[in-house]
């Protein structure tokens, strides 16, 4: 199934033609032992998995990309389709297999595989089916790449990140959920549209559950370093709380709108996850709202729960959680969001 390593043995009897094409440099030193070879594995080659793989390739984030899926024919087709674009992309070895051993030695493993919700199926039953699926996915990934960082994208992402953490045995800094990184991008985009500014100049976070109980941190929003709400109050400019709530509601509903129109989401989450991969593998130490082990932060107690908090990401995963000032109302909503997730987790069989 998987593509073999690059080979120059095209001559008669497998003769290595490399030496015929290239003359060796005299007294050349061997490669440095500190030279990094970056490998990313993507588990699941559905619409989301392939959008992530394609974005990783175009952004030159990996020297090697391994794809894994249970559907062998589709997997091989996706691998070949990407390999055929080699002349237009940075040089990356692309492999694919239904066997998890292909992921051995990965620096980052991105999990997008998951069961889809059946008509009339409860959310709890869907989570339990995905939990069973993760029992066959996570342990072999941990076995073959014991020092990797796990990045969970499958939904419901917060609960499944918790399950992945439990099944992997990894320290919590190396198990991350994509969380509300994309929600926050949508949030910044909507605010930018309202104020007619560039979204890159907007700093704003959605935290908590990646879902209906997410929390918009209005108190910490800034444009070009200017805190928005405090500025409006100082200038005695009136604003309606309902307007703010409508923007947050639009963020929550935006994914559902895309799904209703095209059947699935793919490109935005592809860019979002590639953005996380870059921060992790390039040790960028940027702040992202991602799903992390939240117990002990912002008054969240009562159990081990993963939800999104503004976190600094680097080569070893989560380097720390940002101490963002929250209002009492925001802290209370965040604790309620954690409670919502914990109630679901308490009913699972892991």
Image: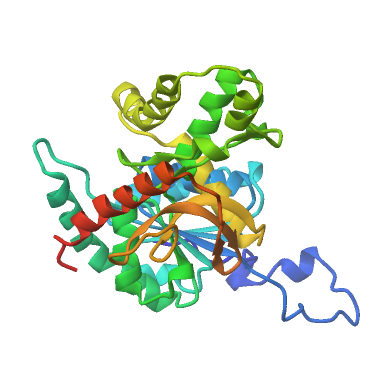
Q: Is residue 48 left or right of residue 124?
A: right
Question: Residue shown at 56%/18% (left/top)?
Answer: 194
Question: Residue shown at 41%/75% (left/top)?
Answer: 170
Quadrant containing the C terminus is bottom left
Q: How many callouts does the rendering have? A: 0
Using the rendered view, name the quadrant where residue 7 is placed: bottom right
Question: Residue shown at 48%/46% (left/top)?
Answer: 52
Quadrant containing the N terminus is bottom left
Closest to the observer, 301 or 14: 301
Closest to the observer, 108 or 247: 247
Question: Residue shown at 36%/77% (left/top)?
Answer: 169
Where in the figure is residue 57, as x and y percent of width and height?
58, 48
**Is residue 311 among what the camera can see?**
yes
Residue at the left extreme of this rendering: 120
**Is residue 99 among what the camera can see?**
no
Residue at the right extreme of this rendering: 26
Where in the figure is residue 343, as x and y percent of width and height?
19, 55
């Amino acid at each position: 199934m998987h593509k073999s390593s690059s080979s120059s043995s095209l001559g008669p009897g497998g003769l290595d033609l490399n030496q015929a094409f290239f003359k060796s440099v005299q007294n050349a030193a061997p490669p440095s032992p500190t030279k990094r070879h970056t490998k990313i594995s993507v588990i699941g080659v559905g619409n989301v998995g392939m959008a992530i793989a394609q974005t990783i390739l175009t952004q030159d984030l990996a020297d090697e990309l391994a794809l894994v899926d249970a559907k062998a024919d589709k997997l091989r087709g996706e691998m070949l389709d990407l390999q055929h674009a080699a002349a237009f992309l940075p040089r990356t070895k692309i492999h694919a297999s239904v066997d998890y051993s292909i992921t051995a030695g990965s620096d980052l493993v991105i999990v997008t595989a998951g069961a889809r919700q059946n008509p009339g199926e409860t959310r709890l039953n869907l989570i339990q089916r995905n939990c069973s699926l993760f029992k066959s996915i996570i342990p072999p990934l941990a076995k073959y790449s014991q020092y990797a960082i796990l990045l969970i994208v499958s939904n419901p992402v917060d609960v499944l990140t918790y399950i992945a953490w439990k099944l992997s045995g990894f320290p919590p800094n190396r198990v991350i959920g994509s969380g509300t990184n994309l929600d926050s991008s949508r949030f910044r985009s909507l605010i930018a549209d309202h104020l007619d500014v560039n979204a890159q100049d907007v700093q704003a976070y959605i935290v908590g559950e990646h879902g209906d109980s997410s929390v918009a941190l209005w108190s910490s929003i800034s444009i070009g370093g200017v805190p928005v709400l405090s500025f409006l109050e100082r200038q005695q400019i009136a604003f309606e709380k309902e307007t703010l709530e409508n923007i947050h509601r639009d963020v929550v509903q935006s994914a559902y709108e895309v799904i209703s129109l095209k059947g699935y989401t793919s490109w935005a989450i592809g860019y979002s996850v590639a953005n996380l991969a870059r921060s992790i593998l390039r040790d960028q130490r940027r702040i992202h709202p991602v799903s992390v082990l939240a117990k002990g932060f912002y008054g969240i107690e009562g159990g081990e729960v993963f939800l999104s908090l503004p976190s600094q990401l680097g080569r070893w995963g989560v380097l720390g959680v940002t101490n963002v000032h929250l209002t009492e109302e925001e802290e209370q909503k965040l604790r309620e969001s954690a409670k919502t997730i914990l109630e679901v987790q308490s009913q699972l069989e892991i």
